[in-house]
Image (tube, helix red, strand yellow):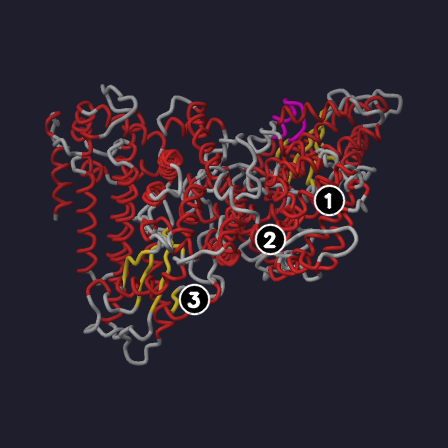
């Protein structure tokens, strides 16, 4: 076969010295380009390491090839340095690298697809088919990556080749399954055509796959349909269960990880109502759904739909039938407003040009790929029904046609086109690092600098400047989308609130907006305008209020529970001490009105805190607010200044509480506005708590010494445990703490006016610290503090000496206490004592353990928690079967059984432990990726729910606004799709929990 011949020739070339002229001009190695070619005397160390298992003669041959092509050497050295995934592909099969370097990359990939299709068509063995599909995927991944990095492929070629590879794999897998079914008598082989023609079963590619724009490590979004009338089913074969089982097998063929890797992660959640429908749907049922209740986002999704496997003609026929749903000949104002509302839901508040680069999501974040795609798709929905030229599924083609037909300015097209190319390149490079479906930039400056080098930039700042320039451009163009469309309330009817009586037309408008009691709503708003609430009495305030009432009512109504949201707004204005600064700001910034409505409609507790501190609105208008979070040094300096200026101890405690409330509001607004992902929100809450603990510790220590003096050699450390230790705090988290101390045992008494001895001294000191953190004052409570994780729990002293702590952990602690210790982190101590404490904790965690016993203990503990708390509530994200507890227990198990040989796995963050375990090969790669995805999703949702609710979340009782907010936090188009994914992930997490803690594999030394 052609591909085999190419590889054979390349290997033969590798057995003798290669002359520069040995490679044809069209060969990939001759076409690779690099920003800075590496002169070759010997191979770059990282690249040489990948080839350490080849023969000396082959190594010399490859070195000669690199010497002849220094740009290729630079590209491959960069891959070896920055991409573990691509490095592994090279290391596992050096002949594959040699073969593709010797070939034209496009021809090479076309040959690979042809050979795979032929092999699968001739095979009746499922294992052989799976292996062939995975080899094709590896060939595609390495070839496309090198051609992309080396600037041989442009973006169109990259996405075209990735899409073609996915198409071929799905088509081959479906054909194999249908052929197998026909052989088993489930389908009539006489009626079944080549590759599944006439099968009555079709697979639609959606999203980027459907558009031919697939990204490097993308899931493939599929919708699977069947026509029971057209399917040539065998006798007594029922269509629904047969095609559902066939689809489940299709997913396994593509998604299951084997020794050869996997083909693609399959996502079937774009089908109608995925939480309650089977994975394969009848055409009739799908058409009925879209006719009855298809949403605007589903119309947008079908712009990119394309049949790729099975009965292709059936897929085209379905899309023709669906065309009137997607492409409407005319669009009324209500539909325009619906699209406008979709745009506003993407980001509740656009913010300013300041964008934090570290941790930014280049797909979903501000100025990202999603905004460009949305910009294009919304224009297509509006105009595509009347102009078929706008119906192309490809983003850049549609953008060009929108400019050609006058819907957008050519300058805007050029800006978005250039930004799209840049952001897709960043997206692909992120995914090449570890073959992960990620769009998030590294969160540390050091890791971002490393990624910047992989992108070809000199340093972090050069890359950040280039990225920010594009993000700001996209954000500005996106913000102007529909800027001339009037607010929905203005087109739906009149909203006027005269002082003397209700306006009849306004009552009708309120009814249309969804208010159950329009008269009560009107009375509430008329009360505002009459100055019933103290803050609204000044005439100038009421003038500004009158200007914002229509958009505020509209935004509150759009949340889906208008009466409750209006009541929250009424409480907000009632609690407001003054509106002199707030109302003018709202009148000048309509997007701030929408943000306030989002807060009041979804997180009324946050709204109440904002009402008590209206000056925080100024922070929202600060151009830097939606950029990087304030660093620890700046926050600590601000708190120190506030405490230093306190008039007395009561004022000092009030200042600490106000500072915490202020920062919680600002972090909460960032979460609700979608500009702060959960991982960074958890870190922000934890960083704030650490700053407050250290500040109050210093105050308490100073005043305690005034009364009791000091003990020679006295040292104190505050240890963060639980969510604080793992930097996974939410708005409602308690502080789990342990206090450790040490002193000179030869001189145990303090030297103050009231002397205390040893343990009594530190117990009294700890009680003072806890009191400072927990005592309610006029400004409220600071934190709840839980000391139950200390040695001996409630029965032990509130503070423990370090020597006693070490003995306890070595001789008396239970497994659950060592599990808790995996999250222990020193938040306050002198550097020397902190080092001693960290050494003590590390020694405990690095002990060699009986793996079976640890697994048994953890399973027993999980069962006990399930018995006490229950595990059947799927939206109880902490305790649900497959929820956060399962993920945390897996991470803690991995630390306890592997830290002795792999100390790098030790981290207080659950997510980082999982990622380190995956990188070290201590957990299956697919399981590790799924656990990381689940961890992020559950933390994202938890952050929103803790802001929004004081009690449990019940989907049936939740406002549409909160459901939409959760969908956005989970990166899903609607709540139904989010719920389907959540339940799917919980099931997968529980299965992984069982595999990792499997008693049959958890025995003896983990390394044996």
Name the residue that disc number 2 marks. 558
**Element class at badge 3:** loop
The residue tagged 1 is: 608
Where, by quadrant of the figure, is residue 620 drawn? Answer: top right
Q: Residue at x 62, y 43 (%)?
A: 595
Mark whose residue sits in front, 3 or 2? 2
Q: Distance between the residues labelled 3 and 1?
A: 43 Å
| Quadrant position of residue 864 | bottom right
- Sequence-earlier tag: 1 or 2: 2
Residue 680 visible, this angle: yes
- Of discs 3 and 1, which sits in the foreground? 1
Which numbered marker is on residue 278? 3
Mark 3 / mark 1, whichever is N-terminal = 3
The range drawn in magenta is 827-838
Q: Which residue occupies the foreground of this view, 472 or 129? A: 472
Pinpoint residue 148: horizontal percent, then vertical percent: 29, 35
* Label 1 to label 2: alpha-carbon separation: 20 Å
- Indicate whether 463 appears above or below 602: above
Say whether residue 560 is magenta.
no
Q: Are marks 3 and 2 in contact (CB under 8 Å)?
A: no
Residue 274 spot, x, y in % from top left = 46, 61
At 45% from the left edge and 27% from the top edge, which residue is drawn? 464
Q: Which quadrant of the view contains residue 705?
A: top right
């Amino acid at each position: 076969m052609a591909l085999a011949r190419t590889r054979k020739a390349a290997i033969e070339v590798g057995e003798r010295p290669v002359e520069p002229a040995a490679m044809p001009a069209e060969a990939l190695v001759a076409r690779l380009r690099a920003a800075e070619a590496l002169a070759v005397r010997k191979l770059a160390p990282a690249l040489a390491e990948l080839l350490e298992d080849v023969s000396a003669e082959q190594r010399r041959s490859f070195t000669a090839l690199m010497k002849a092509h220094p740009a290729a050497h630079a590209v491959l050295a960069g891959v070896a340095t920055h991409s573990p995934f691509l490095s592994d592909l090279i290391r596992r099969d050096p002949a594959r690298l040699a073969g593709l370097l010797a070939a034209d990359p496009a021809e090479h990939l076309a040959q690979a697809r042809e050979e795979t299709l032929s092999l699968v068509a001739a095979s009746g063995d499922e294992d052989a088919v799976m292996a062939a599909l995975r080899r094709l995927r590896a060939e595609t991944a390495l070839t496309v990556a090198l051609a992309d990095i080396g600037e041989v492929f442009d973006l169109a070629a990259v996405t075209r080749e990735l899409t073609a590879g996915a198409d071929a794999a799905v088509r081959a897998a479906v054909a194999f399954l249908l052929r197998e079914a026909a052989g088993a008598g489930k389908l009539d082989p006489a009626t079944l055509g080549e590759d599944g023609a006439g099968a009555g079963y079709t697979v639609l590619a959606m999203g980027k796959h459907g558009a031919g724009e697939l990204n490097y490590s993308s899931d493939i979004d599929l919708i699977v349909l069947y026509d029971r009338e057209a399917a040539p089913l065998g006798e007594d074969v029922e269509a629904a269960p047969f095609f559902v089982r066939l689809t489940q097998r299709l997913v396994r063929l593509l998604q299951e990880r084997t020794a050869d890797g996997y083909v693609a992660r399959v996502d079937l959640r774009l089908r109608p109502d995925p939480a309650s429908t089977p994975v394969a749907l009848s055409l009739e049922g799908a058409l009925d759904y879209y006719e009855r209740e298809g949403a605007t986002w589903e119309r947008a999704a079908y712009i990119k739909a394309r049949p790729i496997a099975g009965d292709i003609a059936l897929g085209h026929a379905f899309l023709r039938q669906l065309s009137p749903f997607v492409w409407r000949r005319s669009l009324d104002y209500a539909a325009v407003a619906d699209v406008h509302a979709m745009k506003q839901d993407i980001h509740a508040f656009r913010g300013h040009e300041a964008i934090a680069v570290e941790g930014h999501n280049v797909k979903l974040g501000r100025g990202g790929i999603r905004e460009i795609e949305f910009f294009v798709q919304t224009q297509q929905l509006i105009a595509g029904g009347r102009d078929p030229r706008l119906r192309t599924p490809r983003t850049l083609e549609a953008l060009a046609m929108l400019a050609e037909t006058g819907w957008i300015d050519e300058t805007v097209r050029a800006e978005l086109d250039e930004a799209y190319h840049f952001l897709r390149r960043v997206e692909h490079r992120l995914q090449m690092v570890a073959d992960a479906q990620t769009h998030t930039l590294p969160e540390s400056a050091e890791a971002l600098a490393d990624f910047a080098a992989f992108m070809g930039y000199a340093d972090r700042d050069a890359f950040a400047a280039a990225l920010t320039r594009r993000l700001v451009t996209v954000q500005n163009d996106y913000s102007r989308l529909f800027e001339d469309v009037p607010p929905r309330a203005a087109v739906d009817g009149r909203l006027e609130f005269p002082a003397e009586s209700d306006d009849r037309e306004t009552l009708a408008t309120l009814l249309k907006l969804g208010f159950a009691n329009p008269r009560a709503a009107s009375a509430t708003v008329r009360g505002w305008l009459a100055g019933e609430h103290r803050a609204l009495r000044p005439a100038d305030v009421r003038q500004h209020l009158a200007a914002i009432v229509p958009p505020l009512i509209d935004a509150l109504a759009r949340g889906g529970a208008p009466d409750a949201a209006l009541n929250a707004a009424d409480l907000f204005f009632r609690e407001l001490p003054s509106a002199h600064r707030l109302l003018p700001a709202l009148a000048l910034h309509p997007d701030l009105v929408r943000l306030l409505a989002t807060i009041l409609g979804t997180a009324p507790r946050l709204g109440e805190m904002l009402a008590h501190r209206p000056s925080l609105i100024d922070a929202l208008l600060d151009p830097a607010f939606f950029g990087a979070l304030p660093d620890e040094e700046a926050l600590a300096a601000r708190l120190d200044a506030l405490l230093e200026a306190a008039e007395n101890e009561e004022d000092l405690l009030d200042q600490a509480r106000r500072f915490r409330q202020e920062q919680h509001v600002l972090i909460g607004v960032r979460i609700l506005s979608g500009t702060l992902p959960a991982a960074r929100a958890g870190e922000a809450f934890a960083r704030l708590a650490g700053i407050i603990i250290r500040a109050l510790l210093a105050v308490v220590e100073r005043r305690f010494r005034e009364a009791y003096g000091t003990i020679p050699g006295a040292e104190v450390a505050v240890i963060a445990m639980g969510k604080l230790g793992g930097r996974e705090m939410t708005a409602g988290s308690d502080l789990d703490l342990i206090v450790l101390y040490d002193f000179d045992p030869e001189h145990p008494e303090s030297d103050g006016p009231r002397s205390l001895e040893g343990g009594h001294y530190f117990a009294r000191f700890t009680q003072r610290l806890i009191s400072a953190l927990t005592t309610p004052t006029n400004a409220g409570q600071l934190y709840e503090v839980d000391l139950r994780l200390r040695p001996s729990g409630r029965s032990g002293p509130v503070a423990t000496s370090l020597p006693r702590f070490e003995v306890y952990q070595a001789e008396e602690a239970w497994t659950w206490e060592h599990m808790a210790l995996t999250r222990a982190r020193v938040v306050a101590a002198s550097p020397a004592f902190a080092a001693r404490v960290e050494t003590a904790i590390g020694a405990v965690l690095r002990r060699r353990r009986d793996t079976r016993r640890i697994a048994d203990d953890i399973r027993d503990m999980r069962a006990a928690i399930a018995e006490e708390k229950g595990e059947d509530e799927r939206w109880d994200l902490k305790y649900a079967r497959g929820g956060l507890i399962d993920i945390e227990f897996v991470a803690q198990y991995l630390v306890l059984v592997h830290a002795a040989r792999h100390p790098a796995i030790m981290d207080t963050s659950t997510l980082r432990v999982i990622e380190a375990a995956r990188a070290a090969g201590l957990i299956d790669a697919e399981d590790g990726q799924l656990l990381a995805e689940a961890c992020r999703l559950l933390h994202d949702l938890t952050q929103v729910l803790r802001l929004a609710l004081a009690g449990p979340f019940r989907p049936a009782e939740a406002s549409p606004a909160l459901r939409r907010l959760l969908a956005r936090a989970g990166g899903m188009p609607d709540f139904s799709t989010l719920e389907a994914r959540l339940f799917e992930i919980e099931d997968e997490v529980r299965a992984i929990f069982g595999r990792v803690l499997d008693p049959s594999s958890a025995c003896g030394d983990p390394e044996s």
